[in-house]
Amino acid sequence: MATPVLVDSTPAPATPVTLTDTNRTTRPPSEVRRSPGTFRWRLWRQYLAFLLLAGPNLALLLIFTYKPLIESFYYSTLQWNIGSPTARFVGFDNYIQFFTSSKTAQVAGNTLVFTLATVGGALVLGLGLALLLNQRIRGRSIARTVAFAPYVLSGIAVGMLWLYIFDPRYGLLGTLLSAVGITSPDWYNSSPWAMVMLIIVYLWKHLGYVALIYLAGLQGISQEVRDAAALDGAGRWRTLRSIVLPLLGPTTFFLLITTLLASLQSFDLIHAMTQGGPLGSTTTLMYQIYQESFVNGRAGYASAVATVLFIVLLVITLIQLKFVEKKVHY
Amino acid sequence: MAAITQPDHLNLPVRQQRQRFTLLDASSYLTLIIAVLVMAVPLVWMFAASMKQPSELTTVPLQWLPQTINADNYATVGDRLPLGRLFANSLLLTALGAGLKILLGLTCAYALVFLPFPFKKTVFAIVLFTLLVPQQITIIPNYTLVASLGWLNTYQGILIPGLASAFGTFLFRQHFLTVPVSILEAAQLDGAGHWRRLWRFVVPMSWPTISAVALVSIVAEWNEYLWPFLVIDNADMMTLPLGLTLLQDIDGMNNWGVLMAATVLVTLPVLVMFLILQRRLVDGLTAGAVTG
């Protein structure tokens, strides 16, 4: 970062403007060096200005993000109902319970299925859509608008809209399926289909975002590179596999991290559509944390689940970042 | 530019590919049209259903359009929910939330870029790291804090815990690093302090970034559900998305016309804003990928 930065804060008329780059902010300009007291005073004034400007945001982050992070570890050692003033210290019991409970196997399985299907599906379908949108064809900008629109809508509203479409009696999907001779499954109440329904809706909502990010990536790949590949006799598929996909590497890694974080935190759709049911078949770790803490009165246990999930997420993200640094050139 | 999606044109020499361009274009078109229909039809269906009478919703050969353009279902939503209050709450919280977030992001980014401070890079890392902290780990402690302050069912209870700006700070910082220093130099010679330099010089040069962040924040605040849902149970304090699930609880899932009318009320403002300000909004939502 070699951008020059203005370090001087006082409007003292006798002092010329001091410019230095950020790596050397503490080095006083020659004139100031003659009076070290003045320099120190000015530096303190600048620190004060920094605190006044950045302080409120930093304080909010500390109070509402970092403090909870630490508190969550503490809560995870308690047997405790969220409204209650009293709690019992139980050590690592919540963690032991989490790792031995049969419910955990189901919830972790649901989370894995939902995450893999939504992240994988969004990346593959999003890339396909981006490749289509990257062609010079008429109506491209309208298609782009339509594809992106669902991403800006409320998750609750999208869930409600699709509940209606999946309605077993009067839903659009059932009617369309029966028109081609397929009997629609009972999406609301049958165990694998409720999850399939959620995945479809999640993909519908998030596809446009992935496609647009990929589209930006595709537009950064110069036509010359592709022309060169074509001259070398590479076909479309070959060009895609050997030229385009590797060059989209950074984009894919970025999307992997962001879609993974978003997918693991999704709450609105599940809450509007299935509330974790039927029989817990769509309860993900996120939804379980909500249910245990705000419905079942087991906030300590929920904190343990949240802590485990956070550590898993952190490890995955760090591995991905490490991998990006090594493998991908920006 | 050639399409590169169709696997049926594998490994053909360039000349042969060129001869098949029209066929290729046709199949891409078809795929694209199907994709657009899949994305658009549910939205059209929602608008149509919001104006259908109960009998029209259950006809067996599917009825696509309502017989009359009417607001009956919307009136029913108004009977069930304090709609004016919900709209006002949503508007107020969105405006305050987005506005304060931008203010916090701008001031924080200005300090990070233009002022010296010990371990400034660490401070920035502390801001960035919060982007990786998922909501599920903060909701329980924050709920406890908000409840102990007596902020349940209050605006500040909804607003303040989510106010800090990490994404905005990040984007503003990236932009501020490109602001030519000579301008601030001139401002300083004129005797402008930091506050004035920020508002009179840096902000006017940053409108594209600010408007992108503003639009993203507006969409996020309008759609926010989980946190308000946890801290609010009084219908008069609810936002529109909360009203939608309240309606679902009251009415069950029998009257789709009414539920779709409420769904339109939640989505339409954002949809209209998106259609008008598309370019900027997309820039903001995809900004992380380009700069990161």
Image: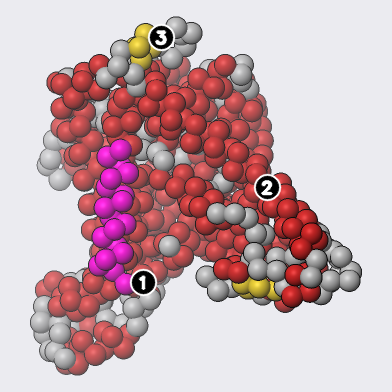
Q: Are marks 1 and 3 on the same chain?
A: yes
Q: Rounded to the nearest whole Å, what is the CA distance between mark 2 and mark 1?
A: 33 Å
Query: Earlier along the polypeptide chain: callout 1 or callout 3?
Result: 3
Mark 1–mark 3 CB contact (< 8 Å) = no
Give the number of the mark in front: 2 or 3.
2
| SS at circle 3 | strand
Q: Which residue is mark 1?
A: A330
Give whichever of B166, B215 is nearer the camera: B166
The amino acid pointed to by label 1 is: Tyr
Q: Which residue is mark 2?
A: A51
Q: Residue at x 18, y 76 (%)?
A: A242
Residue A182 position in % (x across, y down): 12, 40
Using the image, name the chain to which the residue with label 2 belongs: A
- A234 inside magenta stretch: no
Q: Residue at x 31, y 25 (%)?
A: A304
Q: Residue at x 54, y 22 (%)?
A: B145
The amino acid pointed to by label 2 is: Leu
Residue A54 position in % (x across, y down): 64, 48
B44 left or right of A187?
right
Q: Is residue A272 above or below residue B200?
A: above
- The residue range painted magenta reads A311-330
Give whichever of B217, B178 is nearer the camera: B178
| SS at circle 2 | helix
Q: Which residue is mark 3?
A: A87
Query: Earlier along the polypeptide chain: callout 2 or callout 1?
Result: 2
Using the image, name the chain to which the residue with label 3 belongs: A
Q: Quadrant of the C terminus of chain B?
A: bottom left
The amino acid pointed to by label 3 is: Ala
Circle 1: is it few (<14), some (14-19), or many (20+) Cα within 10 Å? few
